[in-house]
Amino acid sequence: MKKCIAVLAGDGIGPEIMKEGRKVLDAIAKRFNHTFEYKEALVGGCAYEKYGHPLPDETRKICDSSDAVYFGAVGGPKWENLPAELTPERGALLPLRAIYGLFANLRPAVIFGPLAEAASLKSERLKGGLDILIVRELTGGIYFGKNKVKTLTLKEEAVQGDYAVDYMIYSVPEIQRITKVACDAAMKRNKKLTSVDKANVLDSSKLWRKVVVDYVQKNYPQIQLNHMYVDNAAMQVATNPGQFDVIVTENMFGDILSDLASAITGSIGMLPSASLSETGFGLFEPIHGSAPDIAGQGKANPLAQILSGAMMLKYAFGLSKESNTIEQAIMAVLEDGYRTGDIASVNTPKDKILSTSGMGDRVVEYIQKLKF
Ligand code: IPM
Ligand code: MG
């Protein structure tokens, strides 16, 4: 198979973890006889420095003409105080999600067995293992409300002094289409779906809950559906994560819950994501940020980036076997005791603590030698 991949490494640790992600894709291409052609483009702060905009036209053209977007991370203190529309987050990442209609964000939080000791929970709380799929709505809610509301009427007391407003807006079709994605995923897993909202306070959540109930009852009667308020869901994820199968939730709740779930897997450096459109076009990125504090030091864990590549193979190209091979190789590397600093423990021998590229090399080596 021949595929063209837009490579947007971004800022901070983005370029160094992306290098490892590509190394691993190249190893897969070689082993399974595929051709992956990469087209690199700047995004985020580095693009702002060169073009005066974090999402230049050149970058969009490259994404337009590619089969998928492989994304690193953007942002950093240097660009935080720019006008909002020029920051890496609001000027590039969010617009990319909106332009390509990437409404369905899949964030699997899986604990790799050998990492149980790096997890933030005591082992008895992890007895049921941890294999949650968070399905986060990605192009609506409070992240994008201002695009939809043009006129502003505020009560008198609110307009005294400085103020800022964000709108959380959801329409019925937006809720239905993300519910469908979550249900389809649940049908391939344990058929359990937890919808997370704040229906005791927010109108958008009341609508969310009603639409999810109606949609699941009508279209997926086999699915066992329950509901949780987001504050309770955070507590439940932190204390009894084994109860979850698929979680579906709106944009901001999904952002917060996925960072929480990542801590349970051992490190935020372990969680990949896929952001998909209705036509199946996708952007694949780790859930973590650009970690400017450790950039360029070879300390970053490249596994979330590598696992995002595995998601790209599966969801964008339908290459499940290749995708599983990457996961198996990572499992074997971890089983043999290799760690980056973030997932190492006091028991990890010094010679098993790897740099960013050391970890990428090891995954490649295991891909080459895995037997099927
Ligand atoms: C994520 C990130 C982004 C988000 C930021 C960088 C805008 O935290 O992908 O989870 O909030 O969606
Ligand atoms: Mg986040």
Image: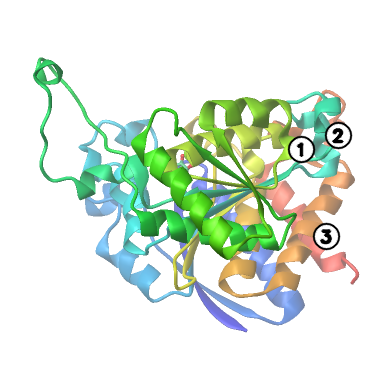
Q: Quadrant of the C terminus?
A: bottom right
At which x and y percent is residue 32? 74, 78
At which x and y percent is residue 331? 82, 51
Instruction: Write down the quadrant of residue 267 in the picture.
Output: top right
Q: In the structure shown, which secondary structural element does the residue marked by tag 1 occupy?
A: helix
Q: CA distance from mark 3 to mark 2?
A: 28 Å
Q: Which residue is mark 3?
A: 366
Instruction: Write down the quadrant of residue 271 in the picture.
Output: top right
Q: In the structure shown, which secondary structural element does the residue marked by tag 3 occupy?
A: helix
Residue at image coords 52%, 43%: 13
Q: Earlier in the sequence, mark 3 or mark 1?
A: 1
Viewed as shown, does residue 101 lie left or right of 302?
left
Dot 2: within a 10 Å radius of its alpha carbon, few (fewer than 14), some, or many (20 or more) residues?
Answer: few
- Which amino acid lies under the numbered mark 2 shown in the image of this protein? Lys
Q: Is residue 320 visible?
A: yes
At which x and y percent is residue 220? 61, 62
Is 363 above or below relative to 120? below
Query: Does ligand 2 reach within 8 Å of label 2's beta carbon?
Result: no
Q: Which residue is mark 2?
A: 127
Residue depth check, mark 3 versus mark 1: number of the one nearer the observer: 1
Q: CA distance from mark 3 to mark 1?
A: 30 Å
At which x and y percent is residue 112? 79, 44
Query: Does ligand 1 reach within 8 Å of label 3's beta carbon?
Result: no
- Which amino acid lies under the numbered mark 1 shown in the image of this protein? Gly
- Which amino acid lies under the numbered mark 3 shown in the image of this protein? Tyr
Q: Earlier in the sequence, mark 3 or mark 2?
A: 2
Front in this rendered view, residue 334 or 350: 334
Residues at discs 1 and 2 in contact (Cβ within 8 Å):
yes
Q: Is residue 20 visible?
A: no
Is 42 above or below relative to 126? below
Q: Which residue is mark 1?
A: 242
